Amino acid sequence: MKWVLASIGTILVLGLVFGVLGFVLGWYRADTDVVSPQNVKAQYQDAYTNFEALKATAGDVCSALAAIDAETDPDARSQRVSEELAYEQNYRRIAADYDAAYDNVFQAEHVGPADLPHTAPGLDAELTTVGCRRGVRAGG
């Protein structure tokens, strides 16, 4: 009977020791998990999504600018300008979302992906990136 109780006691002690070691080593490994590329990309998924949306919206602005330049009817031109302003407003909203996602210090643990800028690019810079330039219309 002593042998059975000693075996059970040994199993319980070993289980406790391995449990504590696993917990402690898990905390030590947490630092490397935080800076791993997979974890950083997962934390910044919103920033990646918004960064791509910025490019797409800059393309929309570019198309709207081309439509404004091509429009000859003053009433239709006014409508095109309104559309272009709406795209610009959408760009600013996405840029704010991007900056908020990137700056989420609690979520990111001060680690940021190397392939994203720290702040959203301005619309004029992004228009240049997509190969577009503003016409003579002011307000850019």
Image: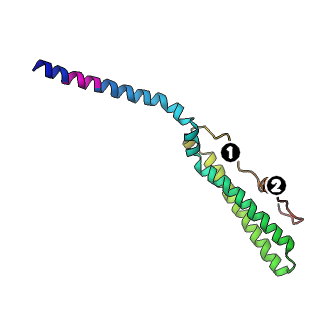
Type of colouring: rainbow
106 sits left or right of 62 in the view: left
Alpha carbon of mark 2 to alpha carbon of mark 1: how far?
18 Å
Mark 2 or mark 1: name the one nearer the start of the chain.
Answer: 1
Up/down of 20 relative to 116, above or below: above
Q: Which residues are magenta?
A: 8-14
Q: Residue at x 72, y 68 (%)?
A: 86
Quarter occupied by the N terminus: top left
Quarter of image, res 35: top right
Residue drawn at point x = 85 percent, y = 62 percent: 134
Q: Nearer the viewer, residue 130 or 57?
A: 130
Is 22 rendered above or below residue 104? above
Q: Amino acid at mark 1?
A: Leu
Mark 1 lies on residue: 116
Q: Is residue 85 magenta?
A: no
Q: Residues within 10 Å of mark 2 (few under 14, many from 20)?
A: few
**Is residue 116 found left or right of 14 in the rendered image?**
right
Amino acid type, residue under disc 2 in the picture: Thr
Name the secondary structure under disc 1: loop
Q: Residue 135 at x, y = what percent?
A: 87, 64
Residue shown at 34% from the left, 25% from the top: 18
Q: Which residue is mark 2?
A: 128
Q: Position of residue 37 (x, y in %)?
A: 58, 38
Q: Splitting the image into 4 quarters, where does residue 40 fall?
A: top right
Q: Residue at image x 82%, y 76%?
A: 77
Residue furthest to the right in view is 136
Q: Position of residue 138 (x, y in %)?
A: 86, 64
Q: Which mark is residue 39?
A: none
Q: Circle 2 — which element?
A: helix
